[in-house]
Amino acid sequence: GPRWNYFFTRDWMLICLSFSSRFNWSELIPLRLWGRTLGLQTENSQFILEGMPFRIFGGSMHYFRVPREYWEDRMLKMKACGLNTLTTYVPWNLHEQERGKFDFSQNLDLEAFLSLAAKNGLWVILRPGPYICSEWDLGGLPSWLLQDPEMQLRTTYKGFTEAVDAYFDHLMPIVVPLQYKKGGPIIAVQVENEYGSYAKDPNYMTYVKMALLNRGIVELLMTSDNKNGLSFGLVEGGIDQPKMVMEYWTGWFDNWGGPHYVFDADEMVNTVASILKLGASINLYMFHGGTNFGFMNGALEADEYKSDVTSYGQPLPLPPMIESKASYGAILLHQYISLWDVLPSLLQPIKSEFPINMENLHLNDSSGQSYGYVLYETVIFGGGHLHSRDHVRDRAQVFVNTMYVGELDYNTVELSLPDGQGFRQLRLLVENRGRVNYGLALNDQRKGLIGDVFLNKTPLRNFKIYSLEMKPGFMKSLRHIAGWSAVPDYFVGPAFFRGRLWIEHQPQDTFLKLQGWEKGVVFVNGQNLGRYWKIGPQETLYLPGPWLWKGSNEIVIFEERTAGRIIQSVDIPYLGRTQYVD
């Protein structure tokens, strides 16, 4: 903890000095620049803003990963670091969680975020996608796109472009008035993201470019790719001179079961200094990482499937102000209710002869289920050999009646079921651990049971399917359900546990440590903080002060297996055993 904090603080201070000591952009900030006609342009090997040489010193911060109450604080820290530009993605899957229902309110108020950037003297490079990667579930694409069995994501396939067009029709009226030439902070817009490494359709980038232009985007267009993807990801009219490091990584994302990656501070400072010396522009990715709250983390699929952890970066301990963190001590989880007792009261099962994958469940106004868990229940006679045929996405706990018998996932595809008398319930509790956000497997990211599961070579049939998306409405109903009881000395989940955190004074940020708990999800006052898992590396969950109340706060934990009795509120995050990235 403290050692990492030292490196992190020192690291950022040195990088900030690299920027702030060299350049004075006082004339080129949003609220001081009038008479705008030219916008950001390129001339030979440099950027020009309103006829004056300009270099982009950017930092990435995602409004959807940071509580709204902290947006301005993070922007002030960017300014203190000498940066002049904020870059952000726009996550389609949050703004249109159900097809045709758009949300740009509260923490998703993009207009407020961009206006706040202007107020704080920051230009904006907007990266609206539709695909954003960002170690975010399905790279920001909504899961309901996968209801179509023929879907070809990130191509000019009609089912995809129609959905993008409908989304852009809602997004662009928010973005267009905030462009530079209309008095706003947006100086450039990125066309899609890293298409060069995907490149399935030669017409796709032109389609996205025209979708932006036709809806009123008039600022400079950019693309972003790694070195190998540059030749495939370009679009006519998108710049490739002057050079800019669009994503200079200041950290690396972690996967469950791996180490916590950090970069060497001195090496980073030297690299940034050499980029500045060459006259290039740069964007620090991330300036402030924030958190994958809820179930929004992405995953990688190279040799094997690996899901990303809940944290996406350390809170910044930088001037001009450092928010103090609180340690509220031990919180007792004094009540519990088994998942099996919750089912009949709160959930109406979907009945189906065949297993149905998560996205194709008839829910959420026909948009399917996006995240969380699905319970598949059927009746069996006798025991024997259960085989998943690799149809479990991503991990299933298997129960006979309420007895746990094992797990099925990518590595374990068969289990022995114990013999027993008469008919019994076979239950598969399947968790979506996060959709892959990068690479060529995007079209294959359906979750739940994506095909038949076999018992003694016979496919299982006649399911009751329970959706456990754990949305705010469900969590609210859970409060009032009968059946909560005192936690016994020993209990094996799946179950919900609840307790109270009492706060006397103004709430502050804190971190929840779940020692003794195995795997699950934490909710505070109905807000989904994200996943925990004892295999690490991450051992604490970030709990923002604005989500806490003075007085009584409700903590609910969904634990899949072995529960502890208490959780600790601590003032220092622990993201795991550090490993330096070469």
Image (cartoon, rainbow, N blue to C red):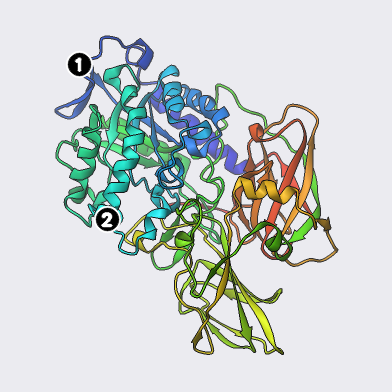
In front of the other: 109 or 188: 109
Q: For the residue labelled by badge 2, is the local secondary structure a helix, a strand or a loop?
A: loop
Q: Report whether residue 518 is seen.
A: no
- Residue matched to label 2: 198
- Graded by Cα atoms within 10 Å as few (under 14), some (14 to 19) or many (20 or more), the crowding at tag 2 reads some
In percent of width and height, residue 512 lies at 69, 46
> Label 2 to label 1, Cα distance in Å?
36 Å
Q: Is residue 329 above or below residue 113?
A: below
Say which quadrant the N terminus sits in.
Answer: top right
Q: Is residue 367 above or below residue 13?
A: below
Q: Amino acid at mark 1?
A: Gly
Residue under the point 45% across and 61% down:
360
- Residue matched to label 1: 51
Residue under the point 45% across and 59% down:
359
Residue under the point 57% across and 28% down:
69
In front of the other: 296 or 253: 296
- Graded by Cα atoms within 10 Å as few (under 14), some (14 to 19) or many (20 or more), the crowding at tag 1 reads some
Say which mark, if any, is on residue 295: none
In front of the other: 481 or 255: 481
Q: Earlier in the sequence, mark 2 or mark 1?
A: 1
Residue under the point 26% across and 19% down:
181
In percent of width and height, residue 481 lies at 75, 53
Q: For the residue labelled by badge 1, is the local secondary structure a helix, a strand or a loop?
A: loop
Q: Report whether residue 318 is seen.
A: yes
In percent of width and height, residue 405 lies at 66, 78
In front of the other: 121 or 271: 121
Q: Amino acid at mark 2?
A: Tyr
In percent of width and height, residue 402 lies at 71, 73
Quarter location, residue 485: bottom right
Quarter location, residue 437: bottom left
Whether the residues at callouts 2 and 1 have beta carbons within 8 Å, the answer is no
The reply, left or right, for residue 576 in relation to residue 79 is right
